[in-house]
Structures are given as C-alpha cells and as structure tokens.
Amino acid sequence: MKEVAFGQYYPVDSFVHRLDPRFKLFFLVAFIAAIFVATNFYGLLVCAGVLVFVILFSRIPAGKVLRAVRGVLFLALFATLIHVFFYAGETVYWSYGIICISREGLISSAFLILRLALLVVCSSMLTYTTTPVALTDGIEAIFHVHVIARIMSIALRMIPSLMEETERVKNAQKARGADFESGNLFKRVKAFVPILIPLLLSAFRIAEDLGDAMESRCYVGGKKRTKYKKLCFSWRDLLGMVVACALVAGVVLLRIYVGATL
Amino acid sequence: MRIVAEHLSYTYNAGSPFAVKALDDVSLTIEEGEFFGIIGHTGSGKSTFVQHLNGLIRVPSSLKRHRAKKPKKGEVLPPAPVLRVGDFDLTEKKTDFRALRRHVGMVFQYPEYQLFAETVAADVAFGLKNFAEKGQKPGKEALDAAVRDALEAVGLDYREYAEKSPFDLSGGQKRRVAIAGVIVTKPEVLVLDEPAAGLDPLGKREIMQLLHELHSTWCKTVVIVSHDMDEIAENCSRVAVFSGGHVRDYMPPKELFRNAEELVGLGLDIPLTAKLVLALKRRGIEIDCDYTTEDFIRKTLAFKGGNA
C-alpha cells in the first residue's frame, strides 16, 4: 500500500499504454540497439529526443521516470569515477600515478552516463506502461515459450506482494523498538535480520499457496491455452514502428556520416 | 494513558493515481483503563487508525503547514488534526517515538509471522533489548526474568518453551509467543489488530481470555480491532464503528447492538445474542440484555420463569 515500486505499472490511459505489448518489446530492442549503435553524441541525442516523446505520450509524470534512474545512480557514479580516473586519454589535464583525468576520459564517461540513463529509462517505460499480464502475453507471442513467460509474470506479480509483506514485518518490528535508521553499516545490516527471516518464510508460504491454487485449478505448464484478451496490431503500432525504424536508420546514418566522438 | 484523536485524516499514496483515502476526519477518545473495541469492514480505516497510535503512520505534517498559512478570503481551512497518547503529542515532529512505542504495544494481524529468532526466549527479549536505554544493557538475569514473566503471562511454561525454536510451535502457541514479545516491555496501552483471526473457536476463546487477564494485570488500556462481533459484545467496554474512513458511532456495545438492524445495513455482522434478541422480538418477546452470553441466558431464563 505504501510507495509504488520502481518499474511498476502506472495506470493511466495513454497512447503508449494502448500499444501492443509485442510491439513495445520490439521497440525496446530496437531502442537498445540504437543506443549501442550510436557512437557519437548526436546519435544519443536523437535517442533521447525520441524517448522524451515516448514519455510525453505516455502521460507518466517526469518525477516517476527520474525515480527509475535513481535506482542505478550508485552504479552509474561508480562507473563514471572509474572512467574519469583511469581512462588513458591523450589530452591529460591532471595525473597522479596511474590516475589521470583526460579530455577523452571525461567525454567517454559523459557518454556512459547518458547511455546508462537512456537504457534504464526506456526499459522502465516498458514496465510503467505495460501490465505484467500484457507483457507476458507479448513475450509468449514472440518466443512461443509459455512456461518462461508464466514464470516471468509470476515474478513480476510477486514484487508488490513482497513489498507489502516487507512493510508489514518492518512495522511489526518497529513496534517492538527495532531501529533501521541509525548506527553504522554493520549495525544496519544486522538490523535487517528480523525482517529478512520472516520475509523469506512468507515468500515460501506465498509461493506454496500460489502453487497449490494453480494446481487445484488444473494448471499444467506448457499446454496450449486460449486468451481472454487477443493481441492485435493497430494504427498506433504502425506509427510506432515507423518511428522505431526511423530511429535506428537515423542513428546508423549519423554513425556513418558524422563518425565517432572519440 | 488517554488517547485523544481529533480530525485525523490519512491518504495512502497521496497525489498519485493510487491515492486511497483511508481516514477522513476521525475523532475518537479512548479513556485509560478501557477495553476498547474497533469494528468495521475491510478497508474502513480501522487498521490505519491503530497504526497511528504508536507512530507507525505519522500525522501528515502538510496539514500543520497548511494551518500555519493564512487562509485566503472565503477559504475554510480544515481543522488541525490532534493526536495525543498520554503525554505524547503525535502531531509534533520531534516526538520521541521510541519512548512512545515502549508505552504503546502493538500486536499486528497474524503476529506469528514476525517471529525470527532461534529460540522463543530470544524472540521475546527482542523488544526488551531494543527499548533498553542506550549504554544500559539489561543484565541476563533481568532479561530472563522479564521473558519468564511475559511467557507465563501468555500461558506458556518458561522451562518448556524458552529454548525451543519458535518455528516448531503450533499456530496458537506462536501467536502467544508473539504477544509475549510485545507485552514484555509492559506497555500501558496494548493495541491488537484481529488478535483471534484464523484461530479455531477454542483458540479464539483462549486468546480473549488471555487478553482479559492481561488487561487486569499488565496493560491498563487494551484496544482491539475485530471482525468478530461476539468477541466485541462479550469483552469491550466501548466500541467504535468505522465505515469508509469515518467513525460512525462509539458507545458501549449494549447500546450499539440495540440498533442491530443498522449495523446489518452497514454490511457488518452482529453477535449471536443480538440475532437471538431480534428473533425473539419478532415473536413478541422483548429481552433487554447487554448482549453478553451470560446476561442473555440469565435474562431469557428469568423471562421464561416470569411467565410460567
């Protein structure tokens, strides 16, 4: 009931929400390919521009989108520092031992951050705008593997349940005077034991209950089954497809004609 | 400790499409020494309300800030929320929540799922260690004595259970251990959210019996949230009815169940005794009892005797 988890479906009605999940998956793959094909800032800027349009058309508040980036902030900072300090560039600004800050290092770390941010934002846009069920249907339709799709959808479905359970256990321990906010790192990690053990037990319990419930309704993995909602391509998907192709083509052209930044 | 709540409102996920208004202008006073019942439908806000009592849910500070602003012309500001538990003012940001939580014990729904330690004794001692003053660790003897008292208070033999793993116990025993883990600090107010949920009738009766004993010996004030109307009718001095985030009524059960039809209209159950009183009324027999089984039986027998 508390805060909405990172990457969880955000229920508003929008152009992007109505797109076919198969297409959205395709778009994600095309977009990621474009990010990696791009070797100069122009390419990435084109990607970012397209992503901004996607966000605008999805009617998801910018704060929510930025929150997704916050999740990988630590990783991004770490990678950036490594890059800034250890990139062996030609134009050196400052150096000490093996550490050196160079023009190339700064540019390349800026590039890295941009890439990482684009990656995270575009993949969280998929989960923000697609329900777990639709996502599973899409994956199933593309790969024709039912079991894996089912496992994925259950895993996604468990996230909010486990969050709720965590909140419950955390509150119960807080009521017994547990303190998760103060003390050094070691103390804080230790403070989580009273949450982790009940949580783990609950996770097994929930999983077992779900398994029983599925089996008692005669669920057998891998059987061909019918769908409540049929997927169908619409004019929106066609439009999106054109944008995706244009994006990839544009980035490739930029790579060929402008060349790499470094 | 007297509990005073006025104009309390709470919205989950405020400002997002998931926003749910859980409490809407709730005002309620619970006197010291009461055995207070809270009833209401799922989602009526009762659990949200009780979580306010030990500061697990804070009174939104935006309301206070709102109050500090000067009202524009013609604008009516909502009255400021008040929430006091004893001497603690929970609308203040600087309240010592640790001290508050020592005085207000909270037993959640299915408390057995919060057990984690290797032995029953260690689990019960968890709260005691947490609430100990900084730098003054309680000695082993003091800890053991307190754990023993708490376990005996919930009806478990210390020697038999102290060194067992809490995960080897039965459901009812686990729940007792969990309750012992809360009362071990001798809170003045004990709040229980559906303490008897999921137990068999005997287990339910035993837990209620236990709460009565605790009420007279350990905790001055007991607040229970319940769906079980029989439980409420038998035990509580007063009852608050929550519905859609509001408090509809609060009064002794005797008066509450007199309007049994209204409760049924709210989608709530009524105690068996109230059902019988209604059925008898339809046959022209008026019984004026306080809806506990004992009183009902006595009055009914007296009625029969009086007519025979």
Image (cartoon, coloured by chain):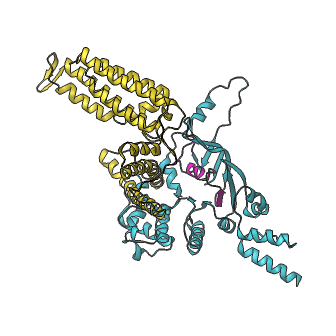
Residue positioned most to the left? A97
Q: On the rendered image, what quadrant is the C terminus of chain B found in?
A: bottom right
Question: In the figure, is residue B305 to the left or right of B31?
Answer: right
Magenta stretch: residue B293 in it? no
- Looking at the rendering, which quadrant does residue A91 occupy? top left
Which stretch is magenta? B32-59
Q: Which chain is cyan?
A: B
Magenta stretch: residue B49 in it? yes
In this view, B116 is above or below A99:
below
Q: Residue placed at 65% from the left, 49% from the top?
A: B4
Q: Which chain is yellow?
A: A
Question: In the figure, is residue B12 to the left or right of A222?
Answer: right
Q: Position of residue B275 (x, y in %)?
A: 75, 69
Q: On the rendered image, what quadrant is the N terminus of chain B found in?
A: bottom right
Q: Position of residue A196 (x, y in %)?
A: 37, 54
Which residue is at the front of the view, B8 or B275? Answer: B275
- Looking at the rendering, which quadrant does residue B59 occupy? top right
Q: Position of residue B220 (x, y in %)?
A: 60, 62
Which residue is at the front of the view, B308 or B99? Answer: B308
In this rendering, does residue B34 appear at all?
A: no
